[in-house]
Amino acid sequence: MNKIEYLIISSTIDFSTDLVCYQLLKKKQKFYRLNRDEFQQHKIVVDVTKKVMTIQNDKEVFEADFETLRGIFFRAPVFLRTQPKAELTVNEQLERNQWSSFLRNLVVFKNAKWLNNPVSTYRAENKIYQLCIAEECGLKIPQTYVSNVTDCVKNLEQKYVVKSLDTALFYDFKSHKEMFTYSNVITGRELVEYDLAAAPVFIQEFLNPKVDCRVTYVCGRLFPVKILQKGKGMYGDWRQRKEELEYITFQLPKKIENSICEMMQKLELNFGGIDLAVVNEEYYFIEVNPTGEWGWLEIKTSMPISETIEKSLES
């Protein structure tokens, strides 16, 4: 029986998790990586009376104690956003629902250092809520509406950013392709032509010209980068061409650092990928992703994000 001190919840293809596991291996830490897409390759028993969880793979058995597990790196979605690629059988529906419940129930490891606790993630992933908290903490936010009508659009010539209220993933059965929605910039004249009755959307003022910034937050330490295209800020959603861009490390103003730290404390998040936009030297909070990507930033900039995560799990 191998008693572990750290539990990693992720998937087999998550590069950011690979980096954290490498740091744990370097320190010879006792940990186990449990991938969501490999649940059925394990025998998992949670003994509620003895307050231990055992995980058995084809070679060994690992034990995590409710009281003494030191840290959990939780790279798992709380909401099931992916759409099934075909009609699910009863067994497949059962697997999808019950394993999600299993992940939420891991909050029984109450003494562990979480990055992040799924309860906090669930709350913080609500974008209206995080915008309100950001503003409470002194961060500027764009003028924002969430609506299934366009009555809030008063200026037909003004440009707006329109995006989904939550990460939207779809599967097209005709083309057999997965689809992801990005932010779109359109005029008020175009926007009022759309019928939004089926679902609400985010409608925000368009900040331009701007410089996008991504701030990776780990337990009070900030790793900010400016996202540039040929040395300049870019128009629209930078995520559509992430690999083509430049990522330049820089120092945030102390006031912005303090506001971000206060916001993350109020959201009860130990980790987050925070998007900011700089317009005329003013910083605007756009959103925070409690399970945001960061692996490519460590490779591009050599910022010690994975090392900081490993040290935070230890503390």
Image (cartoon, rainbow, N blue to C red):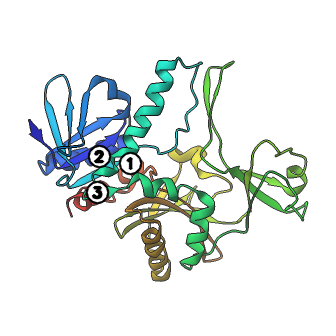
- Where does label 1 land, which residue? 295
SS at circle 1: helix
Number of labels in the image equals 3
Label 1 – label 3 distance at C-alpha? 27 Å
- Residue drawn at point x = 40 percent, y = 45 percent: 104
Residue 220 visible in image? yes
- Residue drawn at point x = 21 percent, y = 64 percent: 315
Residue 16 visible in image? no
**Where residue 112 sits in the image (x, y, percent)?**
25, 56
- Where does label 3 land, which residue? 110
Decide which of tag 2 and tag 1 comes sooner along the chain: 2
SS at circle 3: loop
View extreme (left): residue:
1
C-beta proximity under 8 Å, tags 2 and 1: yes
Decide which of tag 1 and tag 3 comes sooner along the chain: 3
- Where does label 2 land, which residue? 19
Side of 179 relative to 299 (left or right)? right
**Where residue 270 sits in the image (x, y, percent)?**
37, 62
Label 2 – label 1 distance at C-alpha? 7 Å
